[in-house]
Amino acid sequence: MIDFDHRDPGTDPAEWDTRLAQLDVPAWDGWADATRMVVVTPHPDDESLAVGGLIALAHARGIPVEVLLVTIGENSHPESPTHSTSELALVRAAEFRAALRVLNPDAAHRALGVPDGGSGTHEREIEDAIARAVSFAGARPLIVAPWRGDGHHDHRVAGEAAARVAERTGAHLAEYPIWLWHWADPADDSLPWSSAARVDLDGDASYAKQLAMDAYRSQTEPLSPAAGDEAIVDERHLRHFLRSSEVLFLTPSPERAHHSSDDTTESRSRDSFEEFYERRPGGWDFTSWYEARKRDVLLAALPRERFRRTLELGCATGVLTARLAERSDATVGVDIAEAPLQEARWNAPTATFERLTVPDEWPDGAFDLVVLSEVGYYLSAADLERTVDRALDSLSDDGVFVACHWRHPDEDAVTDAADVHERIAARWPGRRSVHHAEDDILVDVFVRDGQPSIAANAGLV
């Protein structure tokens, strides 16, 4: 466990200047390939200190950025005689917004509201927020998060949550140090220099970073002359962050994402579905208000009013197929079992139905809409990825892929809804235009990069 006090002088910045020159940390521009950058900051000012220049560079290059503010930093001065935690919360929130406007006025941001110093009891909440942000981040997400070895509790918890999401989703991870510059010995060879990289800042990025730090007056200047109101980031400590480059520790991205399901698990068999329909000829209960509403949600998420040719994978008795057919010139439904297709032909008489085992078998022709509803969690990891690949091959340039799944346990499933949607997002080369998550269902709409939004198609933007 690392023990340090911000009030101590800490390591001389000049010693670090010498050491960094000796290390000759390689330049890194891999961040420029990111489809979206998700920056995790434990407290207001961490993002500006460590990666303010990177955030500004992303803005200049048109890379979308979302900043997740874990805590509002209300306990930065626990012994202050002049400011309560509620007063500091207001001050620090305003400073965060002002700093982000300077660095990247287009950046999205979200405050998680975790208590300052109490992140250890909110790990799942932090991880879920990062995962949700990554789910919107396209094919090449980059997570920028605190270095797990930084020595501060909130930094470690946020960094570990980010690392778990990166491992699960295949997102790239870059970790930034904050307090390392204060407590570490530059001669310590146990520090992870082999994974270090530098981001070189141009004049505009450096200037924006300086302005952002100027916004954090509650941290860089004393709140008052009284004891307990000292600056947290004094002039000496601030010098660590005013170099012409920023240092990150890079975590190698796995060749493929590791998910909660076992990659060796096989898809649910055709025989098991046939046996299911023998026991329950009508299959699942598609007549409930829950099911009707779910269909409405899925249909409302579609980005176009009408499609030329639609494919529904795992159509069962064709209840959803009938609704899709109302918005399609032609509709094809496929299912692994024959029994439900007899009822499907009655429920959706204008559609065409085939008994196929996806992804080994696939219907002929091109489609501009492929729907995977309540089927993905019956597929093995390999079969799900091949299903996405086959969908891509059969989709037109303006094609749309929709996934909708039940979030609760299913004893016959080989994985779960979250795993399915994460795998699809990791495999999909475009972007996720809709992400709808509620207690019971996940609905995601995937489109190719460059496809206009609904408003753009309507001439509204």
Image: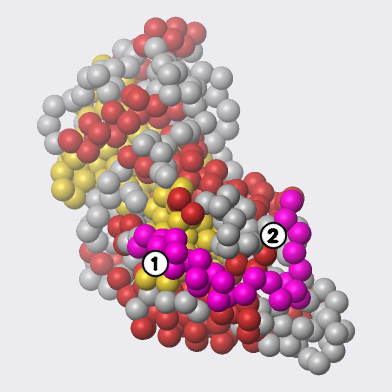
User: Foreground: 9 or 48?
Assistant: 9
Q: Quadrant of residue 234?
A: bottom right
Crowdedness near tag 2: few (<14), some (14–19) or many (≥20) residues, C-alpha within 10 Å: many
**Sooner in the amino-acid sequence: mark 2 or mark 1:** 2
x and y, in percent, of residue 283 in the image:
45, 19
Is residue 339 located in the magenta-colored stretch of the structure? no
Residue at horizontal 41 percent and vertical 61 percent from the top: 25
Q: Amino acid at mark 1?
A: Val
Name the residue carrying label 2. Answer: 152
x and y, in percent, of residue 109 in the image:
51, 68
Q: Which residues are magenta?
A: 1-27
Question: Is 95 on the left or on the right of 141, as rendered?
Answer: right
x and y, in percent, of residue 401 in the image:
30, 42
Label 1 element class: strand
Name the residue carrying label 1. Answer: 199
Quadrant position of the C terminus in the picture: bottom left
- The answer to whether residue 269 is above or below residue 173 is above
- The answer to whether residue 216 is above or below residue 313 is below
Question: Is 185 on the left or on the right of 193, as rendered?
Answer: right
